[in-house]
Structures are given as C-alpha cells and as structure tokens.
Amino acid sequence: MAQLEGRFVNEWTRKFHPKALVYGKMRVGPLPEGDGLAGVLRKYPDKIFIEDGTVHIVEGKVKPSSEAIGQLKLYADLFPLTPEFFFAAGLPIKKLLLTTRE
C-alpha cells in the first residue's frame, strides 16, 4: 500500500505544484550522535516541498486514519531540527494529508 500512496502523492504534487522545489523521502529530525544505524530512526514524510516561502509536508493515505494526523504533527515538529533543511528552518510549515475518496 505504501507504494500506491507514494505514486498518489507524486502525481498530486506534479499536477498541482509543478514549479515547487520538491523533496521526496527525506528524513526529518536531528542527526543522532555516534555511528551505526541510529540515523534510520529518523522519520520521513511522503513528500516535502517548498513553494511561495512555505514548507509543505505531505502524507498520503489510501485509507484515511487519525494516525496520519499525528504523523504530520511529528514531522512538522522535527522539520526545524533537520540539518539538511537548515535553509528553510524559519519558514512557515503547512501540513497536508492527501487521501482518496471513500
């Protein structure tokens, strides 16, 4: 199902935000200290894009769930702590949950 959700989010982004600066499967959160596999514990939303001075964090679900809202909140809280996005740390964040119609 995750693969289907990824395609769904990719198609939506290309269609409605074709000029946005898009990042797919980028992990958010601070880098852990030390070495090993600790970095894989960082979370990643389906898509992050920057458009018109706003960071958009997108999570796609074929079947909507309340868990997805919690995921988006966590991603938004972790985003300013992400070293890869230091250049966007002060921008406003918009959380987007994409779902199919049921």
Image (cartoon, helix red, strand yellow):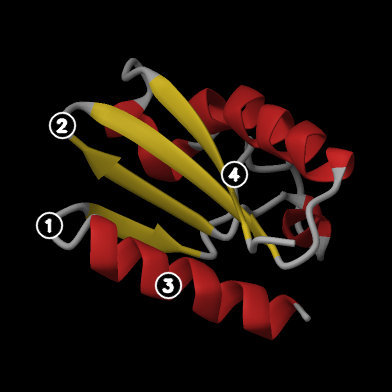
Q: CA distance from mark 3 to mark 4?
A: 19 Å
**Residue 10 placement: quadrant:** bottom left
At horizontal 42% and vertical 45% (from top left) the residue drawn is: 84
At horizontal 73% and vertical 42% (from top left) the residue drawn is: 32
Cβ atoms at labels 3 and 4 below 8 Å apart: no
Q: CA distance from mark 4 to mark 2?
A: 21 Å
Dot 3: element? helix
Q: Nearer the viewer, mark 3 or mark 4?
A: 3
At horizontal 78% and vertical 53% (from top left) the residue drawn is: 64
Label at residue 52 = 2
Whichever of callouts 1 and 2 sits on the residue coming sooner in the sequence is 1
Q: Nearer the viewer, residue 27 or 8?
A: 8
Per the image, the residue denoted by label 3 is 10
Whichever of callouts 3 and 4 sits on the residue coming sooner in the sequence is 3
Per the image, the residue denoted by label 1 is 19
Query: Where 82 sits versus 42, above or below?
Result: above
Query: Where 56 sits versus 18, above or below?
Result: above
Q: Amino acid at mark 4?
A: Val
